[in-house]
Amino acid sequence: MSSAVQLIRSADLAAAPYAYAATAPSGSRLIFLAGACPLEDDGSTTAPGDYAAQADRCVETLREALRASGATLTDVISTRVLVASSSQRDLVAAWDVVHAAFGDHDVPSTLLGVTVLGYDHQLVEIEAVAAVAEETR
């Protein structure tokens, strides 16, 4: 099944590793996902100190939340990637993992350095919104 999400690019804007905007048709079902955190099944934080490993676990968590909602990564319409660091290198380490996971479906995204996140040793969190076509009845 193809995604309801349409990525929008503009030759009038600087080249970026993501689309500048995205739309979904009227009648799409929107899915607002809680921030995907790098938590193991036992509640512990994945790989303390490792931005890339935490980003990877966040993507896994995001995929599972999407699956439970009847969606996949290609249904995501936007993301916000939060990284607990003031170092651009740390932000890029997390971003590279997220960007690779989305592949050609490079949705509009915001990458933010933040002071702290909610769990002990947490360095990365990914918020997302997805859109899926409503099923015809």
Image (spheres, helix red, strand yellow):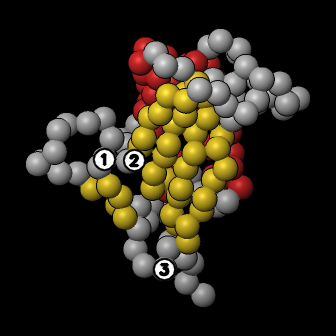
Q: The residue tagged with tag 1: helix, strand or loop?
A: loop
Residue type, numbered disc 1: Ala
Q: The residue tagged with tag 3: helix, strand or loop?
A: loop
The quadrant in which the C terminus is found is bottom right
Q: The residue tagged with tag 2: helix, strand or loop?
A: loop
Residue sitting farthest toward the bottom: 137
In the rendering, at what x and y percent does residue 47 appear? 70, 15
Q: Residue at x 69, y 45 (%)?
A: 64
Q: Residues within 10 Å of mark 1 (few under 14, many from 20)?
A: many
Please give left or right for residue 86 compared with residue 120 in the image. Answer: left
Q: How many marks?
A: 3
Question: Up-down: is 122 above or below 20?
Answer: above
Residue type, numbered disc 2: Val
In the rendering, at what x and y percent does residue 69 appear? 67, 59
Residue 27's disc is 3
In the picture of the structure, the residue carrying the numbered disc 2 is 107
